[in-house]
Amino acid sequence: MTSRSGPSVVPEVSWFWNWVPAPDSDAQTVTDWTARVSALLDEWAGEKVAAARAEWPAEEPEEFPFAIGEMGQAVARSLLERAAGLPAYVRLFWGAAFVGGDLRWMPLLVTAEFREPRADDPAYLMAEVGADGLGGDVREPVIDYVATDRGDGLRVFALASSEEEGVYGRVDAALRLEVPATAAAPGTDVDVLLRTRVFGMDQMALIGFGVEALMHLIAADSMAAPTGDAAPLRFAAPTGGRDQS
């Protein structure tokens, strides 16, 4: 598309996703994750926090909520608290979106439920993600199919509304994941259901692409390393509560 002022330029959008440690993770895993994520968040948002602190009104009775260098730890603690309230078979992912190299949204939250497939037919997943619409939808959903290296799926975007939240965008996605066998466990199929809700037209326009990027990450992190080590992403299936890797 061109205009009288010259060709239009569409900013490049890049996505970062990371999973929050499961509630049963050992203390060292949580400590290492917290330190790594805190430093990363402070690096990304440090300038914005410093600028906001400098503009904080002197007459404001409350102190600025973050000291420089504390924002990352606060967000990391909040993510761990959110993850702690989820069932064992649901994992919390957090993400960030960069537009033209600049941090735009952070953190974006997605829950991923890992479940045993229902027989051999993945058609039931269409209903699980509301492909034909959910009660709060105000427009017909848009369906996009996604192919990953470890299975195929779909993502559904729809505008929805509720009295509590107003208008928001929902993305519900499903992926039938083909987890390869390892020395420790046989191969298996796992259904993954992802869910997120966003507010603001700018996020609604792009979140579908972000969830698709997350689907590819989950597919990649479900595979064992070439060394034979367990896959990076551990998850638990609800039936029997047994861990799978």
Image (cartoon, rainbow, N blue to C red):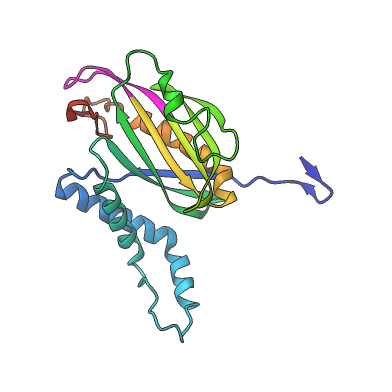
Pick the quarter of the image with the C terminus: top left
Depth order, front residue of 4/84 = 84
Image position of 172 (left or right of 77): right
Residue 19 image position (x, y, % from top left): 32, 43
- Residue under the point 48% across and 72% down: 52
Placement of 7 over or under 187, stated as above or below: below
Image quarter for residue 138? top right
Query: Is 176 part of what is drawn in magenta?
Result: yes
Residue 68 image position (x, y, % from top left): 37, 71
Q: Magenta span covers which residues?
A: 174-190
Task: Let me know if residue 165 appears in the view.
Answer: yes
Residue 228 image position (x, y, % from top left): 22, 24
Pick the quarter of the image with the N terminus: top right
Query: Is 229 part of what is drawn in magenta?
Result: no
Depth order, front residue of 96/130 = 130
Depth order, front residue of 132/221 = 132
Image position of 94 (left or right of 236): right
Query: Outermost residue toward the bottom?
Result: 59
